[in-house]
Image: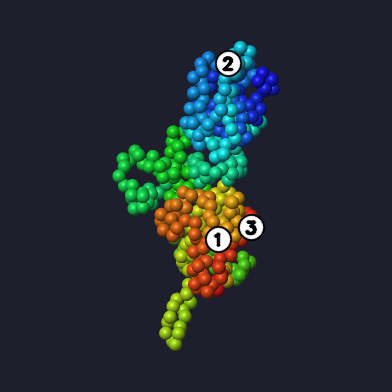
Amino acid sequence: MKDMIRMGESSVLEFKMEEAHNDSIAKEVVAFSNFMGGKLLMGVGDDGSIIGTTNRTVEERVVQICRNNVTPSVLPRTEFMDVDGKEILVVEIPKGSSRPYKVKTTGKFYVRAGSSSVEPTNEELARLFQNGEMVHYETKPVHGACVNDLNRGYLNRYMSEIRQIDEFPEEAYPQVLNNLNLVARVNGDYVPNIAGLILFGNNPKEFLSQSVCQAACFKGIDESTDILELKEFSGAVTEVMEGLLRFVERNSRTDVAFENGVKRKDFEQYPAPIVRELIANAIAHRDYSIWGASNRLMIFSDRLEMRSPGTLPNTITVERMIMGVSYYRNPIIMQVLKDFGYVESIGRGIIRCNRRLKKLNRNGLEIIDLGAELRVVVMNW
């Protein structure tokens, strides 16, 4: 142990004094959990001097910090060791299996960089979320936003009509939003997360450029032809969904079949249930860690395409999607879209769309994974 201390702090070793602040300890625990694990030596100065601990209750304190000041909680391995006649506490933090971890009181994430614990870049944080098994990127708080940036009217309707939550004191409103996973607690304040702004934001574009959905209708079969209509949709998810659905209605036709001179049936070029499902899936499943890219709905003379930034999650392939295997990249967003009735059930969208198309004697959906973008294509014949 003396040789380890003599080598100094490293990417897997941190020294702390017994009286260190709880959040300072939590910061190191989070950084090790988000990295490859490490050891925290309580009772050792930054310069490697052996100070020792004065009270064995420090062990219980550190364990409680790991459980209560870190989200998700961490279970450390602890051991007291004698070094030069002084007792230090060795706290072993395992590599986290539920990354990313954050300090509960500040809402901040940390990773280990050499002998320091630092906040990750957007790209590093995105990778932590992508590799994590329990925490989703949609729960990331959006700094700079506040509860008033959420549309109270849409929220009241959702809470009263769908969640049956209509009686609570006004001061409990932020906590209700927290219970619905639409806000996060950061430094004692309630801050909308990505899901909250996407679903109920007054103007999510102000904070999240990736919240915008674009729609374009072209005269021909590719993007080099004339644009007949081009629009951008932002706002709460219901506004975006309805705007995109109306866009498709305006830019597609309905054919009429006749039999013996009598009108038999109307045939929609792009059936509304299929379009609604594809738009909702694009909003719910896109990778919101990719900035500067938008969901795009493209209508050509022969097809409709729904384009979503990001590749498929690690466990999903195009073949598995067609068979109905699903992965919820943004489960909060998906659940609210289901609550609003934009998807009939979770996980069966592709199968359901293909069954509808088959009944119409139409080609099934074409799903194209381009790596940086996923495209779902509906031919109009």
Helix, strand or loop at mark 1: loop
From the viewer's side, name the closer residue of 324 and 102: 324
Density class for disc 2 (Cα within 10 Å; few <14, some 14-19, many ≥20) is many
Label pair 1/3, CB-CB below 8 angstroms: no
Residue at (61, 65) in percent of width and height: 223
Label placed on residue 370: 3
What amino acid is labelled 1 in the image?
A: Met
Residue at (56, 43) in percent of width and height: 132
**Image coordinates for residue 278, horizontal then vertical, percent:** 51, 61
* Front of the two marks 1 and 3: 1
Label pair 1/2, CB-CB below 8 angstroms: no
Distance CA(mark 1)–CA(mark 3): 20 Å
* Rendering colour mode: rainbow
Helix, strand or loop at mark 2: strand
**Image coordinates for residue 170, horizontal then vertical, percent:** 33, 41
What amino acid is labelled 2 in the image?
A: Glu
Compared with 9, 286 (above or below) is below
Q: Which residue is mark 2?
A: 87
Q: Which residue is mark 1?
A: 323
Compared with 128, 213 (above or below) is below
From the viewer's side, name the closer residue of 40 and 216: 40
Residue at (49, 64) in percent of width and height: 352
Residue at (45, 83) in percent of width and height: 258
**Image coordinates for residue 72, horizontal then vertical, percent:** 50, 37
**Image coordinates for residue 197, horizontal then vertical, percent:** 46, 48
Is residue 349 left or right of 5 when viewed as pictured? left
Label placed on residue 235: none
Q: Earlier in the sequence, mark 1 or mark 2?
A: 2
Is residue 15 left or right of 178 when viewed as pictured? right
